[in-house]
Amino acid sequence: MKTSTSFRLGLLLILFLSLGFSPLVAQEVPALKEFNLQRLDYNQKGMLILGSWAIGNMIWGGIGASQTSGEVKAFHQMNMYWNSVNLVIAGLGYWQATKEVPGTDFWATMEAQHGIEKILLVNAALDVAYMAGGLYLKERGIRKDKERLVGFGKSIILQGAFLMVFDGVMYGFHASHAAELPKLVQNLSLGPQGVSLRFDL
């Protein structure tokens, strides 16, 4: 079984740092500009998807809440509330991705790649917590005979499920993309002068 990309990158980083590698090799790798461009493109497209989901849910929720009552009305209301936050997150995320300049620094690239994968994994864990919270609200609403809680709970379960799929797919794209990074540093060699790398560009 292949070692996960994040684990391999982590081991590579630890190895380089422990050997005092960083001062001995140029950190600028021109090929990394294209690599970082692709990472940012994934982020931009992901935020567009999230933003589209948010806008769609807000429109659907607004119409639904105005034409229904009880549990269904609460369901649509929570969809609007939840996705107003999603829309802000998507807007900020897209803006950040468009403003970031794709660099060629090896260490900055490693940090950015590891960072986005970590964020997506943490988000996926939060998504599970959202669904658990929604399930709790739904069950509590049923026990207390409160339609509003049931509707809110169903909405949060739906939104958590979408976000878990979204974060999982995004992680898959980024992890697959990260598999290309070790190829840039595969020619690691040890010698009397210390550690050196040859980049085949």
Image (cartoon, helix red, strand yellow):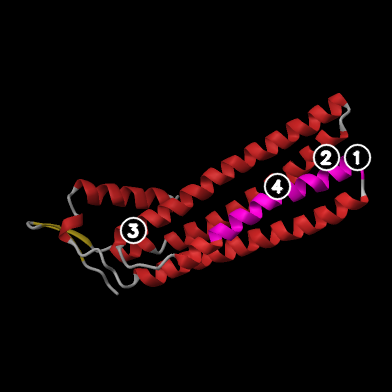
Sooner in the amino-acid sequence: mark 2 or mark 1: 1
Please, what secondary structure does the residue beneath circle 4 have?
helix
Which x, y percent locates residue 150? 83, 35
Front residue of 201/154: it is: 154
Front residue of 53/84: it is: 84
Which residues lie in the magenta part? 69-93
Side of 132 relative to 33 (left or right): right
Residue 108's disc is 3
Residue 151's disc is 2
- Residue 2 in view here: no
CA distance separating discs 2 and 4 = 13 Å
Front residue of 128/88: it is: 88
Side of 90 relative to 84 (left or right): left
Residue 70's disc is 1
Q: Nearer the viewer, mark 4 or mark 3?
A: 4
Say what amino acid the circle numbered 2 marks: Gly
Q: Which residue is mark 4?
A: 82
**Callout 1 crowding tier (Cα within 10 Å): few <14, some 14–19, many ≥20:** some
CA distance separating discs 1 and 4 = 18 Å
- Is residue 166 part of the magenta span, yes or no? no
**Are the residues tagged 2 and 1 within 8 Å (C-beta)?**
yes
Please, what secondary structure does the residue beneath circle 3 have?
helix
The answer to which image quadrant residue 74 occupies is top right
Say what amino acid the circle numbered 3 marks: Ala
Say what amino acid the circle numbered 4 marks: Trp
Sooner in the amino-acid sequence: mark 4 or mark 3: 4
Please, what secondary structure does the residue beneath circle 2 have?
helix
CA distance separating discs 2 and 3 = 45 Å
